[in-house]
Image: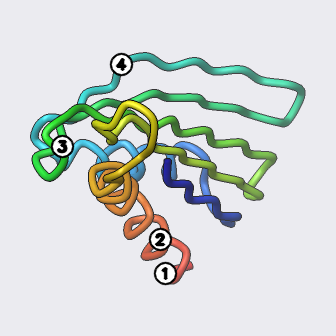
Amino acid sequence: MAKYERRLNGNFDEVLRIAHDSINRSMSATLEDQSYANFGDVRVAIRVYERYSWLGGNRVSLNLTLVGEGSNLFLSAISSGGSQAMFFKVNTWGEESFLETLSRSMEKYAAGR
């Protein structure tokens, strides 16, 4: 399992679009499901993506949660599922690689604001 979390200042819809586009750069990535909720001024988007990992020879998932109140945003992304071992996680390359596609885009977005 690999995790990336980041506080951002920006537009909720724009950050969600950039995150989605960066994840979908992977040829085998698919958006499996999504959920949205509003609590007054607070918005929440939850998305689950999946892709095939060439490095690990298996499928990995990425759960993305974006919470926003105005321009104050919090993004949490957790990837999982890359190991082939029965009792121990012996390779997490696919999980880390999947997460890196998102984290690079979010760091670039944060630096540009």
Image-based side of 76 in relation to 109, left or right: right
Q: Amino acid at mark 1?
A: Gly
Mark 4 residue element: strand
> For the residues marked 2 and 4, what is the alpha-carbon distance in whole angstroms?
25 Å
Whichever of callouts 2 and 4 sits on the residue coming sooner in the sequence is: 4
Foreground of the two, 88 or 79:
88
* Percent x, y of residue 89: 42, 46
Q: Amino acid at mark 4?
A: Glu
> For the residues marked 2 and 1, what is the alpha-carbon distance in whole angstroms?
5 Å
Q: Amino acid at mark 2?
A: Tyr
* Percent x, y of residue 28: 13, 35
**Label 2 with label 4: CB-CB less than 8 Å:** no
> For the residues marked 4 and 1, what is the alpha-carbon distance in whole angstroms?
30 Å
Mark 3 residue element: strand
Q: Which mark is residue 100?
A: none
The residue tagged 1 is 112
The residue tagged 3 is 53
**Label 2 with label 1: CB-CB less than 8 Å:** yes
The residue tagged 2 is 109
Tell me the mark number nearer the camera, choosing from 4 and 3: 3
> For the residues marked 3 and 1, what is the alpha-carbon distance in whole angstroms?
30 Å
Q: Residues within 10 Å of mark 2 (few under 14, many from 20)?
A: some
The residue tagged 4 is 32
Query: Above or below — where is 23 with respect to 85?
Result: below
Whichever of callouts 3 and 2 sits on the residue coming sooner in the sequence is: 3
Query: Above or below — where is 93 with respect to 67?
Result: below
* Image point (82%, 36%), residue name: 42
Query: Above or below — where is 23 with respect to 104?
Result: above
